[in-house]
């Protein structure tokens, strides 16, 4: 298994990219995520998620899993959650 500079392996990266690319960064439910990745829910909850949460790449919310700003940046992507949450504030308003 290849591991990157933050300790993420292929499954970790696939997990985060799935949330970001298929579900706009979340929130997304674990069952939906499990089906999208093709990985067992138990494996995701017991193996993948604890590490990603500990490293600050993932948040579990009532609405589902959300990729953090740190995850977006680490994967070289623009966007992600802002301090305002889902609000897109227009400074001209």
Image (tube, rainbow, N blue to C red):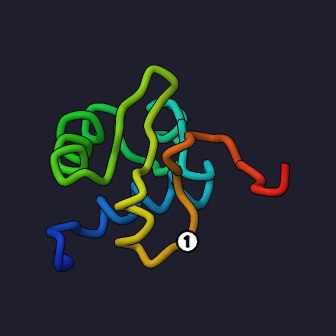
**In the rendering, at what x and y percent does residue 35 appear?**
52, 41
Which residue sits furthest top? 62
Relative placement, left or right, of 43 versus 72 is: left
Q: Is residue 60 above or below residue 11?
A: above
Give x and y (percent) for residue 80: 53, 57
Screen quadrant of the N terminus: bottom left
Q: So how many labels did they put on this image? A: 1
Residue beneath the point at 56% across and 40% down: 85
Which residue appears at 62% of the width and 54% of the height? 22
- The front one of 24 and 3 is 24
Rendered position, 74 above or below 60:
below
Q: Secondary structure at mark 1?
A: loop
* Residue 5 position in % (x across, y down): 17, 79
Q: Is residue 53 left or right of residue 35?
A: left
Q: Residue at x 77, y 53 (%)?
A: 90
Mark 1 — residue? Answer: 78
Q: 55 or 46, which is in the foreground? A: 55
Using residue 77 as the reference point, say whether residue 47 is left or right of it. left
Residue at 41% from the left image edge and 70% from the top image edge: 73
57 to the left or right of 22 = left
Query: Badge 1: few (under 14), some or many (20 or more) residues near its Cα, within 10 Å?
Result: few
């Amino acid at each position: 298994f290849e591991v990157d500079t933050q300790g993420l392996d292929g499954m970790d990266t696939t997990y985060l990219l799935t949330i970001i690319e298929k579900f706009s960064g979340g929130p997304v439910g674990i069952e939906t995520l499990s089906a999208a990745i093709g990985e067992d829910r138990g494996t995701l909850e017991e193996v993948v998620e604890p590490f990603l949460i500990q490293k600050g790449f993932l948040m579990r919310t009532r609405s589902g899993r959300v990729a953090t700003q740190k995850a977006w940046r680490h994967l070289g992507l623009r966007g992600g959650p802002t301090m305002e949450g889902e609000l897109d504030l227009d400074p001209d308003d």
